[in-house]
Amino acid sequence: MAKTQYTCVECGYKSVKALGRCPNCGAWDSFKEESPVGRALAGGSRGGLAKVRPLPNPDAVVRLGEVDPGGETRFDSGIAELDRVLGGGFVPGEVLLLGGEPGVGKSTLLLQVADRMLRRGKRVIYLAGEESPGQIRLRAERLGVSGDLELLRETELEAMLATLEAAPPEFLVVDSIQTLETTSAPGSLVAVRDATSALTRFAKAHRVTTVLVGHVTKEGVVAGPKVIEHVVDATLYLETAGNFRVLRSTKNRFGPVGEMGVFRMEEAGMEEVANPSEAFLAERPVGAPGSVVALTLSGERALALELQALAARTPFPAPRRVSQGLDSRRVDVVLAVLERRLELPLGNLDVYVNLAGGLRVFDAGLDLAVALAVYSAVVGKPIPADFAVVGEVGLAGEVRSVEGLERRLREGKRAGFERLLYPGVVRNVEEAVKRLI
């Protein structure tokens, strides 16, 4: 006799009896009875119902040399900064996941992309799962979006897929994936996973470029099971950096990973920042101790950014080490090198290091800039304003080469810094300090 099984609708945990609280995810009253017949059809059970064995398919295995390579037929989004992050534009049948905090501008950016697609003759459908059609129209009118944009108000997954399959669009926006209703509660781990898998199959079968909007948790990751990011082709994050919005790619099957696009939120929507180096250096204080221009690399893009340091006498037994926008472990290593190799007294000083502009960059090429900024802040002498620096610092105090050095140096010269300090020009931190301070 087949036994009844219960499944948690939040995380998929299975039990032979209904539990008040799931031992796996901690959800209350989340167990749902699973039919023995359904289990048998899905994969059989130990209760006597026979598993349905599929017939062999000789066409399922093919030789690699017989596969049609096809090729990527990209089409650009009409927004240069977005195309840079995507690796050249969208690919038909591609599924992207766009994450970001509430209010960061995900819906605004996608409405602008949808408008660009409409003006190029593509059919676009926008799933309005979180906002009413009236709210979307108000935003669309403010952004100047074409009235030909089609809105889909169906959030039940099966009904939505049936509607889309009847007349597949060329571009689909799902805002958001957490609003789709399946056999599980909307927003639950199981519902998000099932909806993402179903939409991915639909996109591949009909070559529909699909963008899924995902909520971000307080930990900074897309809400839902990690399997979502494995299913989709690309994962993008929209973040706030001071007065700017930064779009990053953390996964991309059709382009480079780690690329960055910079936008500014204005009344008319998201505007591209064509020259991020100039924008991030606009408020740089000239002649202030502890300030230096560093040349960094994000994906294929080189940037000139201001790095600041401040040293103050500490009232506590253990001095504080605070870093913002940088890898705190690398900052600690650089401080140890300054104390040991240059005999810089830091034992009774609080040290604060900040990458101005709100960006987060974990780049070993910023080590030399950190060392010079801290040294300048401690001794109270400014670094010449026309210098830009780059280089990794080793434990012996040596200055090492970094990835993309030529691109960084070109960006430094383009940003107006004729005097550059980099590996090869200086051999160690002590030599760099003597040159600039």
Image: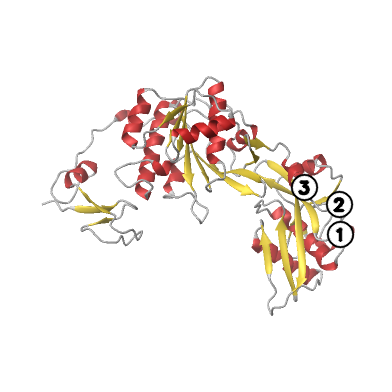
Q: Amino acid at mark 2?
A: Ala
Whether residue 421 appears in this view of the structure is: no
Report, in whole angstroms, how far the alpha carbon at label 3 lies from the one at label 2. Answer: 12 Å
Q: Secondary structure at mark 3?
A: loop
Residue 385, x across and y down, in percent: 86, 52
Secondary structure under tag 2 reads: loop
Q: Is residue 186 above or below residue 15?
A: above
Asked whether residue 305 is in view, the answer is yes
3D distance between C-alphas at marks 3 and 1: 17 Å
Neighbor class of circle 3 (other Cα within 10 Å; few <14, some 14-19, many 20+) is some
Amino acid carrying label 3: it is Leu
Residue 361 or 220: which is nearer the viewer?
A: 220
Tell me if 112 is positioned left or right of 420 in this view: left
How much space separates mark 1 and mark 2, taking CA atoms?
A: 8 Å
Residue 333 in percent (x, y) is at: 70, 65
Please state if 248 lies on the left or on the right of 202 as rendered.
right
Q: Which mark is residue 318?
A: none
For image coordinates 70% across by 51% down, the residue present is 357
Q: Within 10 Å of the Cα at label 2, are there few (<14), some (14-19), or many (20+) other Cα atoms?
A: some
Q: Earlier in the sequence, mark 3 or mark 1?
A: 3
Closer to us: 234 or 272:
272
Label 1 belongs to which residue?
382
Q: Is residue 167 above or below residue 174?
A: above
Instruction: Identify residue for label 3.
Output: 281
Residue 385, label in figure: 2
Where is residue 337, by image quadrant? bottom right
Evaluate if marks 1 and 2 touch, with contact meaning CB atoms under 8 Å apart. yes
**In the depicted view, which residue is nearer to us: 257 or 291?**
291
Element under disc 1: loop
- Residue type at mark 1: give it: Pro
Looking at the rendered image, the quarter that the C terminus falls into is bottom right
